[in-house]
Image (cartoon, helix red, strand yellow):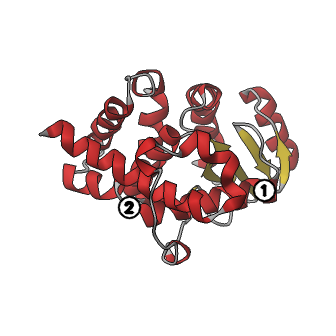
Amino acid sequence: MRKFAYMFVVFGLAVGLGVWLNQSPQTAALDQEFALPFAANAQSSDADAGATEIIDMVQGAEDAPITVIEYASFTCPHCARFHSDVYKLLRKNYIDTGKIKFIFREVYFDKYGMWASMIARCSGPDRFFGMTDLILNSQSTWARAGDDLAIVEALRKIGRLSGMQDAALDSCLQDGDKLRALVGWYKENAQRDGIQSTPSFLIDGQPYKNMDYEEFAKILDEKL
């Protein structure tokens, strides 16, 4: 019975994204990364996708003198390493001290990163960064759990750690409108800011590639 429930969740995700892909010819190149076999014949209207608001996830003082935007994928090993080695020091020394405003924007290279993003966002803005830590810290476990159903269940377990109930998790993972809106939001961000790899950063609008803490701190200190 539980297996069929998870299959329904995966089917809902596939249909939601499959519809978006089918109705947007420009996204044909993304089909291999996102579409599931269940979505092959999906048909629907994407009229509601534009009405679904996607907000930036922000940490730090709104009036901080420097704004740092990170573009990251939940399935990117370099992103997981950045958060374990660099981000925690940035938070301690720059975010929590009011020196920078930090914005986290997701990049979707595959369906599993998309599903992780949906669960992190469904936990709410107040819990998003805590969920992000949990997801990235356990990336090597959940992302290699096995087939689609095993990965869905592994992500659901992480969601429960944040206090989410099964009904809320199922509802989150079946939200096709939000899924389509997130893909559109990601594409717009990536095209506007020239994002081609993760993690990538904008520091007061200037692009930077992945770097260690010492290099990051040097750049921030010079700007400060």
Circle on res. 104: none
- In the figure, 14 relative to 155: above or below? below
Q: Residue 13: image x %, image y %?
A: 40, 51
**Which residue is disc 2 drawn over?**
175
Residue nearest the viewer, comparing 206 with 216: 206
In this rendering, position of residue 14 left or right of residue 184: left
**Secondary structure of residue under mark 2:** loop
Q: How much space separates mark 2 and mark 1, taking CA atoms?
A: 25 Å
Q: How crowded is mark 2: few (under 14 residues within 10 Å), some or many (20 or more)?
A: some
Q: Which of 222 and 137 is in front in this view?
A: 137
* Amino acid of disc 2: Asp
Point 56% across, 39% down: residue: 110
Q: Is residue 108 visible?
A: no
State the mark number for residue 191. 1
The answer to which of marks 2 and 1 sits earlier in the sequence is 2
Residue under the point 28% across and 36% down = 157
For label 1, the crowd category at 10 Å Cα-Cα, with few meaning under 14, some 14 to 19 and many 20 or more, is few
Q: Type of residue at label 1?
A: Gln
Element class at badge 1? helix
| Residue name at image x 77 percent, y 35 percent | 216
Residue 128: percent from the left, percent from the top?
44, 51
Q: Position of residue 50 (x, y in %)?
A: 56, 75
Relative to 65, is 178 on the left or the right? left
- Quadrant of image for the N terminus: top left
8 lies left or right of 181: left
Foreground residue, 196 or 42?
42
Task: State the residue lying farthest toward the front.
Answer: 41
* Location of residue 138 (image quadrant): top left
Q: Relative to residue 6, is residue 99 depicted above or below?
A: below
As displayed, is residue 89 above or below residue 64? above
Quarter of the view holding residue 7 = top left
